[in-house]
Image (cartoon, rainbow, N blue to C red):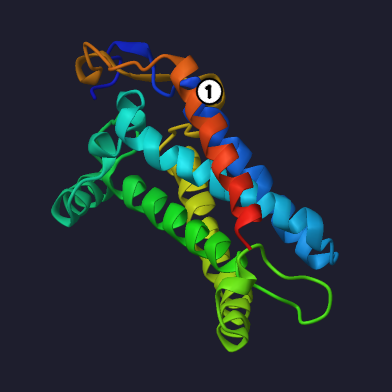
Amino acid sequence: MAAGGETVRVRAWDLPTRLFHWALVITFAGSWYTAEQGMTEWHERLGLTTLALLAFRLIWGFVGSGTARFAGFVRGPLAAWRYARETFAGRHPAYLGHNPLGGWSVLALLFAMAAQAGMGLFATDEILFEGPLYTLVAHETALTLTGRHHQFFDAILVLAAIHVTAVLAYALLLKTDLIRPMVTGWKTMPAEQAPERIARTPTWIAAVLFVGCGLGAWAITLVG
């Protein structure tokens, strides 16, 4: 965008997407803290909450508002490469939602956290704690999944560090604030690149979906 070009404020993120984002941050931090403190009951509750959040985000990725839908930000490797090339060349294309690289980062984090929480369902400390689905697998399998559950946390930390570093780099090097839009929902962008219309999904649908996902996560505790 040329210097002095007109900019507009556009509604980038709907409320359900923003609430999901910050709730996931809280449950991730809480899961780490409760694991470190040996608070197994709360660790399990937070893990189930994480699963409910991720299940909601999966569904919302198909029926949610435009920028929340996977179809709106999941692009092929070539698109990600072109975006990186344009950005490093100083042309930095503007996107209302996730850019092609950011989209892959989001998918990686969602997949990693789902795998982590899923393995926790079968975990055991062989003393006091057993995950809600522990009885559905052999004891040796549960021990293997428990070990993977502990080890995989490091992979999530790496992905989270990359995510945070990218957000800081955008703010410091590209003068693009990615945090404020995820708080307020609004984003400032070049007028010529702003979309004319963005698909909106009523918030009440998100509320119904999350209640359903929460009930589904609770039902897992009844299986074992």
Mark 1: few, some, or many residues within 10 Å (few <14, many ≥20)? Answer: few
Residue 194 location in percent, x, y? 25, 17
- List x then y, in percent, for residue 97: 34, 31
In the foreground, 164 or 115: 115
Foreground: 108 or 83? Answer: 108
Image: 78 above or below 61 = below
**Residue tagged 1:** 207
Residue located 60% across and 58% down the image: 223
Q: Is residue 37 above or below residue 202?
A: below
Where 10 falls versus 40 (above or below)?
A: above
What is the quadrant of residue 186 in the picture? top left
Horizontally, is 22 left or right of 192 in the view?
right
Mark 1 residue type = Ala
Q: Residue furthest left?
A: 78
**In the figure, residue 130 lies in which quadrant?**
bottom right
- Residue 105 makes an appearance in the image: yes
In the depicted structure, whether residue 154 falls above or below residue 184: below
Say if residue 181 shows up in the picture. Answer: no
Q: In the figure, is residue 47 to the left or right of 83?
A: right
Viewer-nearest residue: 176 or 202 = 202
- Residue shown at 30%/25% (left/top)? 66
Report the residue that reaches farthest toward the front: 223
Disc 1 secondary structure class:
helix
Location of the N terminus (image quadrant): top left
Residue at the extreme bottom: 140
